[in-house]
Image (spheres, helix red, strand yellow):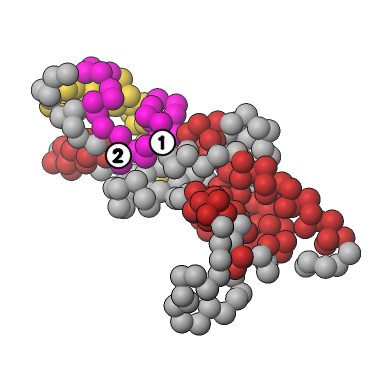
Protein backbone atom coordinates (compact mmCIF):
# COMPACT_ATOMS: atom_id res chain seq x y z
CA UNK A 1 0.00 0.00 0.00
CA UNK A 2 1.41 3.40 -0.98
CA UNK A 3 2.17 5.90 1.78
CA UNK A 4 2.08 8.86 -0.61
CA UNK A 5 -0.42 11.62 0.03
CA UNK A 6 -3.92 11.01 -1.28
CA UNK A 7 -6.69 13.24 -2.57
CA UNK A 8 -10.37 13.07 -1.70
CA UNK A 9 -13.57 14.87 -2.57
CA UNK A 10 -15.54 15.49 0.63
CA UNK A 11 -19.28 16.14 0.46
CA UNK A 12 -19.93 17.69 3.88
CA UNK A 13 -23.22 18.75 5.44
CA UNK A 14 -23.17 22.48 6.25
CA UNK A 15 -25.92 24.01 8.40
CA UNK A 16 -25.68 27.28 10.32
CA UNK A 17 -28.08 26.25 13.09
CA UNK A 18 -31.06 23.99 13.81
CA UNK A 19 -33.50 26.53 12.36
CA UNK A 20 -31.66 27.01 9.06
CA UNK A 21 -31.86 24.58 6.14
CA UNK A 22 -28.62 22.77 5.43
CA UNK A 23 -26.97 21.36 2.32
CA UNK A 24 -24.06 19.22 1.18
CA UNK A 25 -21.01 21.22 0.07
CA UNK A 26 -18.07 19.74 -1.84
CA UNK A 27 -14.48 20.26 -0.71
CA UNK A 28 -11.24 18.95 -2.19
CA UNK A 29 -8.42 17.80 0.09
CA UNK A 30 -4.99 16.77 -1.17
CA UNK A 31 -1.77 15.28 0.15
CA UNK A 32 -3.55 13.35 2.91
CA UNK A 33 -1.43 10.67 4.56
CA UNK A 34 -3.03 7.20 4.67
CA UNK A 35 -1.96 7.09 8.33
CA UNK A 36 -3.99 10.19 9.22
CA UNK A 37 -7.13 9.70 11.22
CA UNK A 38 -10.43 10.88 9.77
CA UNK A 39 -10.59 13.77 12.22
CA UNK A 40 -7.01 14.79 11.46
CA UNK A 41 -8.05 15.00 7.81
CA UNK A 42 -10.92 17.31 8.82
CA UNK A 43 -8.46 19.37 10.87
CA UNK A 44 -6.33 19.90 7.77
CA UNK A 45 -9.38 20.92 5.77
CA UNK A 46 -10.37 23.42 8.46
CA UNK A 47 -6.85 24.90 8.48
CA UNK A 48 -7.17 25.50 4.74
CA UNK A 49 -10.63 27.03 5.11
CA UNK A 50 -9.52 29.40 7.87
CA UNK A 51 -6.45 30.41 5.84
CA UNK A 52 -8.82 31.35 2.99
CA UNK A 53 -11.02 33.39 5.34
CA UNK A 54 -13.85 30.85 5.25
CA UNK A 55 -15.72 29.42 8.23
CA UNK A 56 -14.38 26.16 9.63
CA UNK A 57 -16.58 23.07 9.65
CA UNK A 58 -18.01 22.36 13.10
CA UNK A 59 -17.69 18.78 14.34
CA UNK A 60 -17.59 17.20 17.80
CA UNK A 61 -14.42 15.68 19.21
CA UNK A 62 -12.68 15.33 22.55
CA UNK A 63 -10.43 12.44 23.58
CA UNK A 64 -9.65 11.10 20.08
CA UNK A 65 -8.99 7.74 21.70
CA UNK A 66 -12.34 6.04 21.06
CA UNK A 67 -13.57 6.64 24.62
CA UNK A 68 -15.61 9.87 24.83
CA UNK A 69 -18.22 9.12 22.14
CA UNK A 70 -18.18 12.67 20.79
CA UNK A 71 -17.20 12.00 17.15
CA UNK A 72 -20.72 11.39 15.88
CA UNK A 73 -20.41 11.41 12.09
CA UNK A 74 -22.17 9.37 9.43
CA UNK A 75 -19.66 8.51 6.70
CA UNK A 76 -20.99 7.26 3.37
CA UNK A 77 -24.25 6.37 5.11
CA UNK A 78 -22.67 4.41 7.98
CA UNK A 79 -22.44 5.83 11.53
CA UNK A 80 -18.70 6.04 12.38
CA UNK A 81 -17.77 4.83 8.90
CA UNK A 82 -16.93 1.52 7.21
CA UNK A 83 -14.67 -0.07 9.82
CA UNK A 84 -16.55 -2.13 12.41
CA UNK A 85 -16.09 -1.49 16.14
CA UNK A 86 -14.21 1.74 15.43
CA UNK A 87 -15.04 5.35 16.25
CA UNK A 88 -14.46 8.12 13.71
CA UNK A 89 -11.41 9.39 15.58
CA UNK A 90 -9.73 6.00 15.19
CA UNK A 91 -10.77 5.51 11.58
CA UNK A 92 -7.78 6.02 9.27
CA UNK A 93 -7.72 7.36 5.73
CA UNK A 94 -6.08 4.15 4.46
CA UNK A 95 -9.62 2.73 4.57
CA UNK A 96 -10.53 4.98 1.62
CA UNK A 97 -9.18 4.66 -1.91
CA UNK A 98 -7.22 7.55 -3.39
CA UNK A 99 -9.62 9.86 -5.22
CA UNK A 100 -12.69 8.60 -3.37
CA UNK A 101 -15.78 10.74 -2.85
CA UNK A 102 -16.70 10.69 0.84
CA UNK A 103 -20.06 11.95 2.11
CA UNK A 104 -19.99 13.20 5.71
CA UNK A 105 -23.23 13.96 7.56
CA UNK A 106 -24.34 14.36 11.18
CA UNK A 107 -26.27 11.62 12.94
CA UNK A 108 -29.87 11.81 11.72
CA UNK A 109 -32.58 11.42 14.37
CA UNK A 110 -35.34 13.73 15.59
CA UNK A 111 -34.20 13.49 19.24
CA UNK A 112 -30.70 14.57 18.05
CA UNK A 113 -31.34 18.07 16.63
CA UNK A 114 -28.50 19.56 14.60
CA UNK A 115 -26.65 22.34 16.43
CA UNK A 116 -24.35 23.32 13.58
CA UNK A 117 -22.85 21.51 10.58
CA UNK A 118 -21.89 18.05 11.89
CA UNK A 119 -22.68 18.71 15.57
CA UNK A 120 -25.86 17.28 17.09
CA UNK A 121 -27.43 17.76 20.51
CA UNK A 122 -27.43 14.40 22.35
CA UNK A 123 -28.58 15.72 25.72
CA UNK A 124 -31.56 13.35 25.43
CA UNK A 125 -29.13 10.60 26.43
CA UNK A 126 -28.14 12.55 29.53
CA UNK A 127 -31.77 12.81 30.60
CA UNK A 128 -32.29 9.06 30.17
CA UNK A 129 -29.30 8.37 32.41
CA UNK A 130 -30.48 10.94 34.95
CA UNK A 131 -33.90 9.27 35.06
CA UNK A 132 -32.55 6.00 36.37
CA UNK A 133 -28.78 5.95 36.50
CA UNK A 134 -28.44 5.97 40.25
CA UNK A 135 -27.58 3.79 43.24
CA UNK A 136 -28.82 4.91 46.67
CA UNK A 137 -26.70 2.46 48.68
CA UNK A 138 -24.24 4.35 50.85
CA UNK A 139 -20.80 3.02 50.03
CA UNK A 140 -18.80 5.05 52.53
CA UNK A 141 -15.07 4.61 52.07
CA UNK A 142 -13.41 2.36 49.55
CA UNK A 143 -14.68 -1.19 50.33
CA UNK A 144 -12.50 -4.25 50.33
CA UNK A 145 -12.45 -5.86 46.89
CA UNK A 146 -13.92 -9.08 48.27
CA UNK A 147 -16.56 -7.46 50.52
CA UNK A 148 -19.34 -8.15 47.99
CA UNK A 149 -18.92 -11.40 46.11
CA UNK A 150 -19.81 -10.94 42.44
CA UNK A 151 -19.67 -13.97 40.11
CA UNK A 152 -17.30 -13.45 37.20
CA UNK A 153 -19.97 -14.01 34.57
CA UNK A 154 -22.13 -11.29 36.16
CA UNK A 155 -19.20 -8.89 36.44
CA UNK A 156 -18.23 -9.54 32.83
CA UNK A 157 -21.72 -8.74 31.53
CA UNK A 158 -21.90 -5.55 33.61
CA UNK A 159 -18.48 -4.45 32.37
CA UNK A 160 -19.41 -5.16 28.76
CA UNK A 161 -22.50 -2.97 29.18
CA UNK A 162 -20.47 -0.23 30.87
CA UNK A 163 -18.27 -0.05 27.75
CA UNK A 164 -21.06 1.95 26.04
CA UNK A 165 -19.70 5.43 25.30
CA UNK A 166 -23.09 7.00 24.52
CA UNK A 167 -22.08 8.06 21.01
CA UNK A 168 -25.56 7.57 19.52
CA UNK A 169 -24.50 5.45 16.52
CA UNK A 170 -27.20 2.93 17.47
CA UNK A 171 -29.87 5.61 17.09
CA UNK A 172 -28.45 6.90 13.82
CA UNK A 173 -28.37 3.41 12.29
CA UNK A 174 -31.88 2.40 13.37
CA UNK A 175 -34.70 3.13 10.90
CA UNK A 176 -36.91 3.86 13.93
CA UNK A 177 -34.30 6.03 15.69
CA UNK A 178 -34.54 3.67 18.64
CA UNK A 179 -32.26 4.20 21.64
CA UNK A 180 -32.97 0.79 23.15
CA UNK A 181 -29.36 -0.43 22.83
CA UNK A 182 -28.00 2.61 24.66
CA UNK A 183 -30.68 2.52 27.36
CA UNK A 184 -30.38 -1.21 27.94
CA UNK A 185 -26.60 -0.95 28.25
CA UNK A 186 -26.86 1.80 30.85
CA UNK A 187 -29.50 -0.16 32.77
CA UNK A 188 -27.50 -3.41 32.58
CA UNK A 189 -24.31 -1.97 33.96
CA UNK A 190 -26.16 -1.22 37.21
CA UNK A 191 -28.95 -3.80 37.28
CA UNK A 192 -26.66 -6.80 36.90
CA UNK A 193 -24.60 -5.96 40.01
CA UNK A 194 -25.69 -6.59 43.63
CA UNK A 195 -25.35 -2.89 44.45
CA UNK A 196 -27.89 -2.02 41.78
CA UNK A 197 -30.61 -4.48 42.78
CA UNK A 198 -32.37 -2.15 45.26
CA UNK A 199 -33.52 0.23 42.48
CA UNK A 200 -33.63 -2.27 39.63
CA UNK A 201 -37.40 -2.15 39.01
CA UNK A 202 -37.71 1.59 39.52
CA UNK A 203 -34.68 2.26 37.33
CA UNK A 204 -35.92 0.36 34.30
CA UNK A 205 -39.42 1.91 34.51
CA UNK A 206 -38.05 5.45 34.76
CA UNK A 207 -35.44 5.06 32.04
CA UNK A 208 -37.88 3.62 29.51
CA UNK A 209 -40.44 6.29 30.41
CA UNK A 210 -37.84 8.99 29.70
CA UNK A 211 -36.85 7.19 26.51
CA UNK A 212 -40.42 7.54 25.27
CA UNK A 213 -40.64 11.19 26.34
CA UNK A 214 -37.55 12.04 24.30
CA UNK A 215 -39.22 10.77 21.12
CA UNK A 216 -37.03 7.79 20.29
CA UNK A 217 -38.69 5.05 18.26
CA UNK A 218 -39.41 1.45 19.17
CA UNK A 219 -37.05 -1.47 18.70
CA UNK A 220 -38.07 -3.84 15.90
CA UNK A 221 -35.07 -6.19 16.19
CA UNK A 222 -33.37 -5.41 12.89
CA UNK A 223 -29.98 -5.29 14.61
CA UNK A 224 -28.45 -2.28 12.84
CA UNK A 225 -27.62 -0.86 16.27
CA UNK A 226 -25.45 -3.83 17.21
CA UNK A 227 -23.75 -3.80 13.80
CA UNK A 228 -22.51 -0.20 14.11
CA UNK A 229 -21.81 -0.05 17.85
CA UNK A 230 -18.09 0.80 18.21
CA UNK A 231 -17.93 -1.04 21.53
CA UNK A 232 -19.72 -4.21 20.48
CA UNK A 233 -22.78 -3.83 22.74
CA UNK A 234 -25.14 -6.68 21.87
CA UNK A 235 -28.90 -7.12 21.55
CA UNK A 236 -28.78 -9.40 24.61
CA UNK A 237 -29.02 -6.30 26.79
CA UNK A 238 -32.22 -5.19 25.05
CA UNK A 239 -33.78 -8.62 25.61
CA UNK A 240 -32.85 -8.50 29.30
CA UNK A 241 -34.24 -4.98 29.69
CA UNK A 242 -37.55 -6.06 28.13
CA UNK A 243 -37.82 -8.88 30.66
CA UNK A 244 -36.94 -6.57 33.53
CA UNK A 245 -39.48 -4.03 32.32
CA UNK A 246 -42.26 -6.64 32.13
CA UNK A 247 -41.56 -7.77 35.72
CA UNK A 248 -41.31 -4.20 37.02
CA UNK A 249 -44.55 -3.19 35.27
CA UNK A 250 -46.39 -6.12 36.82
CA UNK A 251 -45.14 -5.15 40.28
CA UNK A 252 -46.04 -1.53 39.68
CA UNK A 253 -49.67 -2.44 38.99
CA UNK A 254 -49.85 -3.29 42.68
CA UNK A 255 -48.06 -0.09 43.70
CA UNK A 256 -44.85 -1.83 44.72
CA UNK A 257 -42.42 0.17 42.60
CA UNK A 258 -43.28 3.83 41.87
Which numbered disc, 2 or 1, marks the residue closer to the eye?
1
According to the picture, the residue beneath numbered tag 1 turns out to be 85
Q: Where is residue 165 shown, x and y percent of the image?
A: 44, 50
Quadrant housing the C terminus: bottom right
> Which label sits on residue 57?
none
Q: Residue furthest left?
A: 4
Whether residue 117 is visible here, answered yes or no, is no
Q: Residue at x 46, y 82 (%)?
A: 141
Q: Secondary structure at mark 2?
A: helix
Q: Is residue 76 a member of the stretch shown in magenta?
A: yes
Q: Where is residue 176 shown, x and y percent of the image?
A: 63, 35
Local crowd at mark 2 within 10 Å, few (<14), some, or many (≥20)?
Answer: some
Q: Where is residue 61 shown, x and y percent of the image?
A: 32, 49
Inter-mark Cα distance, 2 to 1: 10 Å
Whether residue 31 is visible here, answered yes or no, is yes
Local crowd at mark 1 within 10 Å, few (<14), some, or many (≥20)?
Answer: some
Q: Residue furthest bottom?
A: 140
Magenta region:
75-100
Q: Secondary structure at mark 1?
A: loop
Q: Residue at x 60, y 38 (%)?
A: 235
Q: Residue furthest right?
A: 254
According to the picture, the residue beneath numbered tag 2 turns out to be 90
Q: Is residue 15 above or below residue 63?
A: above
Quadrant housing the N terminus: top left
Q: Is residue 118 left or right of residue 168?
A: left
Q: Is residue 24 left or right of residue 209?
A: left
Q: Is residue 244 a member of the stretch shown in magenta?
A: no
Q: Is residue 211 above or below residue 76?
A: below
User: What kind of secondary structure does the magenta stretch mostly adopt?
Assistant: loop
Tally of numbered discs: 2
Mark 2 / mark 1, whichever is N-terminal = 1
Closer to us: 1 or 214: 1
Amino acid sequence: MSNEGRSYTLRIWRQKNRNTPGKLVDYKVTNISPGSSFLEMLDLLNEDLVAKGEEAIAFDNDCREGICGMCSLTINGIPHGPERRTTVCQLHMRKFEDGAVITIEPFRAKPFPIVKDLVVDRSAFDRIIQAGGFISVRTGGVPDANAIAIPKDVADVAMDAAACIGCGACVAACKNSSAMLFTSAKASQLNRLPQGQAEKDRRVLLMISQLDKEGFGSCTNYGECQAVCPKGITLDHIAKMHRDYAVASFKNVFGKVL
